[in-house]
Image (spheres, rainbow, N blue to C red):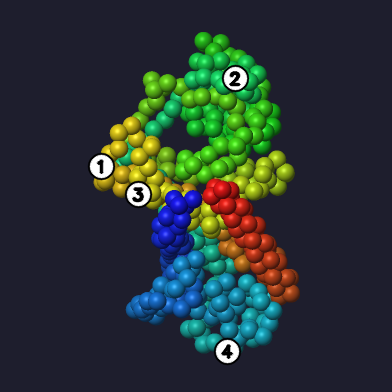
Amino acid sequence: MLETFLILPISIIAFAVLLMIIVFFHEYGHFSVARLLGVKVDVFSIGFGKPILKWVDRKGTEWRISSLPLGGYVKFFGDLNAASQGPAEAAQRPATTQFPGPREADEIAGGMSAEDRKVCFHFKPVWARAAVVAAGPLANFVLAVAIFTVLFMTLGRGMIEPVVGGVAEESPAAMAGFEAGDRIVSANGQRIEKFGDLYDAVLVSGGGEMRFEVDRGGETVSIVASPRRIEDTDRYGNKIERWQLGIAPPSQEYYSFRKYGPVEAVAAGFGELGRILALTVRYIGKIVLGKEDASQLGGPIKMAQYAGQSVMSGFDDSSYREPPGFLFKLRSSLIDFIFLSAVVSVSIGFLNLLPVPVLDGGHLMYYAYEAVAGRPLGARAQAIGFRLGIVLLASLMIFVTWNDINNLLSSIS
């Protein structure tokens, strides 16, 4: 219990740094494409609330570092607020994320000069608005790929061949007929190239029946097995539940490690991005279908907990045969924290692309309608969608925070 409370201030600081880095890149994505397309940006803020530090650049944008580092925003010229809700002249109308129609847009435009309309986000063509909105999540993905690329080039990447090292007694793998030395070729039709691929496949299986193709001494064997749910701990010692077959990794001779060249590292970085996104989509799909436990979803508290634990991970002497020096421990911790930053960046990018009004994906959904229909969605429909989006987002935050508190109390007890 004492250790949990000692790590609390470290977790808070690490979480704030993690969030500021990821939010900066997300908002800079919006900002850079907006500037490229001639949109005037009034405010670029990291965090919410009262500004701690602010300055104005030569193009008139006010940059802020605010007191609550729990997000950030870019405010375009003409916005009511950070959600890009219409120009200020539209304040009397229901809250929307676009102009409801050409006639009302003309009325608003009447209060602006021709120069103002040229730099106003809301008067840009739909493709330009969509590009600005999509640039935020894409910036998160680019950040993740860049981090993975640098790590693969400088530190390298380990790989374990998909060979069965051992089979636990009375496990699903034992009952299905797996044997030590089996080389797993595919799982549910997907090629298994490394042991981590097998772990991922089982992780999102939902406990359903899995079909494996196995190379056993040069002969192809088909095996059917259903993972079982177990209580386990993650790499930081937190209690989790996951699906398990009961297959142990192979001996050291099947391990390899190498550094990548620039081109290979970039390709591997995109591959890692695709892997995380695919796992995320499949996991959420299992939750929607009731085949996965939603209590495993985490929110800000869990993110802060993981951030703090990653920063301290290199200083856990139990993970070493012989405790190394301080600089080695510090380096290990920083690498773990940087890798976590990449994973969280992917998650935030994905979350923002969900088609929920108030999120970037909601804006893109409205713009898609406008592109197809030739006119924006009506003001009332947009307002209803916007309010439903707030309710959905608030409900999700309450749910994941409740999960975080329960899991935190469980780890303390």
Q: CA distance from mark 3 to mark 1?
A: 15 Å
Image mark for residue 169:
2
Q: Nearer the viewer, mark 4 or mark 2?
A: 2
* Residue that label 1 marks: 325
* Res. 334 mark: 3
Mark 1 or 4: in front is 1
Look at discs 3 and 1 and give the one toward the viewer.
1
Q: Is residue 247 above or below residue 152?
A: above
Along the viewing direction, whichever of 280 and 305 lies nearer the viewer: 305
Disc 1 crowd rating (10 Å Cα; few below 14, some 14-19, many 20+) is few
* Disc 1/disc 2 C-alpha distance (Å): 40 Å
Q: Residues within 10 Å of mark 3 (few under 14, many from 20)?
A: some
Q: Earlier in the sequence, mark 3 or mark 1?
A: 1
| Mark 2, other Cα within 10 Å: few <14 / some 14–19 / many ≥20 | few
Could you tell me if the residues under marks 1 and 4 are in contact, i.e. CB atoms within 8 Å?
A: no
Question: Real-space Cα distance between discs 2 and 3?
Answer: 38 Å
Tell me which numbered mark, 1 or 2, is placed earlier along the sequence.
2
Horizontal placement of 139 versus 102: left or right? left
Residue 283 in the image, given as x and y percentages of width and height: 62, 43
Residue type highlighted by circle 4 = Gly
Which residue does the image show at 48% across and 45% down from the upper left?
Answer: 273
Q: Position of residue 265 (x, y in %)?
A: 37, 40
| Residue 334 coordinates in the image, percent (x, y) | 35, 49
Q: Which mark is residue 295?
A: none
User: Can you say whether 389 is above or below 259 in the image?
Assistant: below
Question: In percent of the image, x 45 and y 52: which residue is there?
Answer: 2
Mark 2 vs mark 3: which is more N-terminal? 2
Do residues under tags 2 and 3 come within 8 Å of each other at their CB atoms? no
Q: What amino acid is at disc 2? A: Glu
Q: Which residue is mark 4?
A: 111
